[in-house]
Amino acid sequence: MITYRIATELGPVRVVTDGIYRPGPPLVWLHGWTLSPWGWVALMPPALRTRRRWYALSLPGHLPDEDGPRTPPLTPERLAAALAQAIQDLCGEAPVQVVGHSLGGFWGLCLAVHRPTRLERLVLVSSFARGRLSGALARVQLADHGVGRVLFRLGYRWLTARPERWRRLLARLSGRPEAWQETSGQVFFESVYPDAKRYRPDVLLQLAAAVAHMDLTGQLGSVQCPVLMIAGERDPVVPVAHAREMADRLPKARLEVLPGVGHVPVVEAPDAVCALLERFLSVEKSLSV
């Protein structure tokens, strides 16, 4: 694999790719908050890995051991501009297909709303249009101030200090906690944990707090590219009701709800997710929406 960084107005973005040119629209993979591009690299559907040109990108502020830019106000327009800039550097003018998990999906949705010509297809995995999340993560998003920031920093460092603590946290976000003991969970965890324990908590919190004030719900009707939504029936972070609302508002969306699955479908139901991605993103025959 080849790893390098490209500059954007929100700071450097890390890129992971195999460096092999293949025909068809380039694929851009975007990971979730506190995770890593290596997660998608580890569990990418084999047919897409070997037949398509692909790039796994890091979210803004997700560079190990490096300060991210503090550039308020962070807006959906600025997020879209940064992603469009990265795609331009990687792919030139060619429209791309984007697959995003959770916050990575929201980043892709910002592109669909504000830079629609750059996007041919979009996959949203456990993602959202309203940045204020549910459950414990909603409280985290409100902690970007004095005492809250200190507590988050200490808590994040404690959780990531030992792999078993971080694994237990991910399992709590899952509808199938046992998946983290299976092959897909072990491979994914071993791929993302080395980065997670080295990220800077203040930068992660800044990004989460900024996204909490963003809402693209009213603009979903403007998204004209086909969208595949993959949601977990038992997702504690993005309720399936929100996914259904998004699907109703997106003109060309297809929603697939996976029974018994939580916030990380690629780990909890890897075969189902791979099959959906391969059909929807296939060059030869795409899944209708």
Image (cartoon, helix red, strand yellow):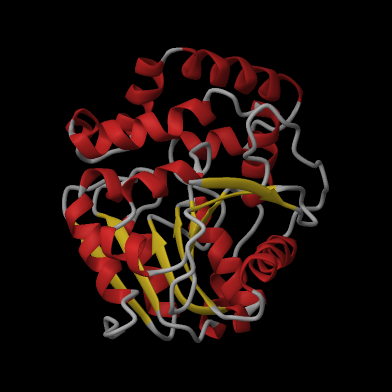
Q: Residue at x 57, y 75 (%)?
A: 112
Residue 56 in percent (x, y) is at 50, 54
Q: Quadrant of residue 247?
A: bottom left
Q: Is residue 196 above or below residue 17?
A: above
Q: Is residue 216 visible?
A: no
Residue 229 in percent (x, y) is at 35, 67
Residue 17 in percent (x, y) is at 50, 54
Q: Is residue 152 above or below residue 14?
A: above
Return the residue nearer the eye: 62 or 228: 62
Locate residue 45 relative to residue 14 in the image: left or right. Answer: left
Q: Is residue 288 above or below residue 269?
A: below
Q: Is residue 14 visible?
A: yes
Q: Is residue 147 above or below residue 128?
A: above
Q: Residue at x 49, y 68 (%)?
A: 21
Q: Residue at x 52, y 58 (%)?
A: 19
Q: Quadrant of residue 124?
A: bottom left
Residue 94 in percent (x, y) is at 59, 80
Number of numbered discs: 0
* Residue at the extreme front of the image, as rendered: 20
- Which quarter of the rendering shows the C terminus? bottom left
